[in-house]
Image (cartoon, rainbow, N blue to C red):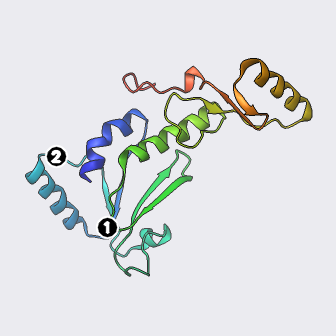
């Protein structure tokens, strides 16, 4: 909760909202939040849903019967504005989440959606994106000519381009 609270500004700049889910009670959540504040001065900046009977956690596969019938594994879901789960990360209970990778995933999803392209392995913001493969032989020939001229790919099936300016998020201006 502390790490996500510290990163909440980054998520907000990406038009992303954080939401916690726990099988503990609301009084337990209040105690955690208060204790975190008393010990660190950090105010948890996002809501935490109390899922006492584990109904939501079970529907999302957050309770692993191999580990426990009541304790959740450490899941992260990236859910888009249409309610579609786009990414699921599952961390063992003894491993902390890696916030920079979660932010990068959100950025990559947003870039892929905006540019109608793909992001490569190890893609980072502002790096080139992968152009969709041609759908016809004529487009394939055009793509090969483009690659030969612009040196922007390996072959017709792996061509890169700079991300469109309208898809680049400026963290200072939140656009």
- Whole-percent x and y of residue 50? 31, 65
Residue 91 to residue 46: above or below: below
Q: Quadrant of the N terminus?
A: bottom left
Q: Which residue is the site of mark 1? A: 94
Q: How many marks?
A: 2
Quarter occupied by residue 7: top left
Taking depth in this image into account, of 87 and 151 the one nearest to the observer is 151
Kindly give the residue lying farthest to the right in the view shown: 137
- Whole-percent x and y of residue 86? 55, 51
Taking depth in this image into account, of 156 and 115 the one nearest to the observer is 156
Which residue is found at the position 15% from the left and 54% from the top?
36
Q: Mark 2: few, some, or many residues within 10 Å (few <14, many ≥20)?
A: some
Which residue is found at the position 51% from the left and 27% from the top?
126
Left or right? Give the position of 133 relative to 127. Answer: right
First of labels 1, 2 by sequence position? 2
Viewer-nearest of discs 1 and 2:
1
Q: Which mark identifies residue 42?
A: 2
Left or right? Give the position of 55 relative to 32. Answer: right
Q: Which mark identifies residue 10?
A: none
Task: Label 1: state its secondary structure.
Answer: loop
Taking depth in this image into account, of 43 and 153 the one nearest to the observer is 153
Left or right? Give the position of 18 relative to 35. Answer: right
Residue 99 to residue 67: above or below: above
Taking depth in this image into account, of 58 and 106 the one nearest to the observer is 106
Quarter occupied by residue 103: top left
* Mark 1 and mark 2: Cα distance apart in space: 23 Å
Task: Label 2: state its secondary structure.
Answer: loop
- Whole-percent x and y of residue 154? 73, 33
Residue 1 to residue 157: above or below: below
Q: Mark 1: few, some, or many residues within 10 Å (few <14, many ≥20)?
A: few
Kindly give the residue lying farthest to the top in the view shown: 149
């Amino acid at each position: 909760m502390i790490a996500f609270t510290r990163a909440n500004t980054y998520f907000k700049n990406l038009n992303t909202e954080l939401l916690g889910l726990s099988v503990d009670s609301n009084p337990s959540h209040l105690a955690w939040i208060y204790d975190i504040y008393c010990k660190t001065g950090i105010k948890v900046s996002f809501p935490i849903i109390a899922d006492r009977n584990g109904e939501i956690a079970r529907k999302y596969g957050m309770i692993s019967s191999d580990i426990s019938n009541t304790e959740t594994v450490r899941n992260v879901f990236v859910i888009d504005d249409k309610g579609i789960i786009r990414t699921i990360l599952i961390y063992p209970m003894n491993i902390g989440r890696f916030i920079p990778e979660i932010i990068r995933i959100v950025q990559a999803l947003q870039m892929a959606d905006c540019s109608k392209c793909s992001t490569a392995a190890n893609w980072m913001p502002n790096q080139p994106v992968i152009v969709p493969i041609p759908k016809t032989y004529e487009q394939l020939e055009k793509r090969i000519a483009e690659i030969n001229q612009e040196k922007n790919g390996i072959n017709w099936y792996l061509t890169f381009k700079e991300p469109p300016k309208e898809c680049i998020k400026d963290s200072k201006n939140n656009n």
